[in-house]
Amino acid sequence: MKGILILVISLISFNVQATECSTAFGEQVYPAFCGSCHDALPREMVPKFELGDRLDKTDDELIDTILNGKGMMPPWNVQNWTEEQLNEIICYLRSLQES
């Protein structure tokens, strides 16, 4: 019984951590590295995160795109962002979607 209780508490903690994340680094990076294209170019050319474009992708898929580029988007792996910083970028992108 004690083991089940610990498992349940662990799952609840994981769920809380998974749904709450920091957007601080993303708020700094997006205008400097992303906004000039994603905010300025038409939707036919680049995803519009505020409209939910590409937000159906997993975090790992989005991180892969950030690091390796896609289409006209350059790779940003030369920035050597940490895993935590990449996660904050993804959290920020997901926060842009209009409800």
Image: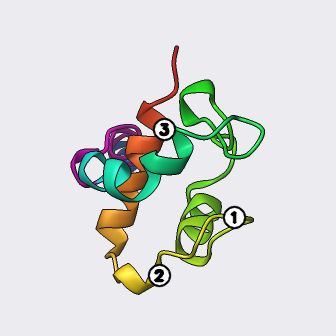
Q: Mark 1 points at which residue?
A: 72
- Near-viewer residue (34 or 66): 34
Q: Nearer the viewer, residue 56 or 67?
A: 67
- Looking at the image, is mark 2 or mark 3 earlier in the sequence? 2
Q: In whole angstroms, how far apart are the C-alphas of marks 2 and 1?
A: 15 Å
Mark 3 — residue? Answer: 94
> In the shown orientation, is residue 32 left or right of residue 94?
left
Q: What element carries label 1?
A: loop
Q: Is residue 3 in sight in this rendering?
A: no
Graded by Cα atoms within 10 Å as few (under 14), some (14 to 19) or many (20 or more), the crowding at tag 3 reads: some
Q: Residue at x 47, y 75 (%)?
A: 76
Res. 77 mark: 2
The residue lying at 65 percent from left, 62 percent from top is 61
Q: Is residue 48 above or below residue 63?
A: above
Name which residue type carries label 1. Answer: Met
Residue occupying the point 37% across, 50% down: 30
Q: What stretch is highlighted in magenta?
A: 12-25
Does the CB distance between marks 2 and 1 fall below 8 Å? no
Label 1 neighbourhood size at 10 Å, few (<14), some (14-19), many (20+)? few
N-terminal-most mark, 3 or 1: 1
Which of discs 2 and 3 lies nearer the camera? The answer is: 2
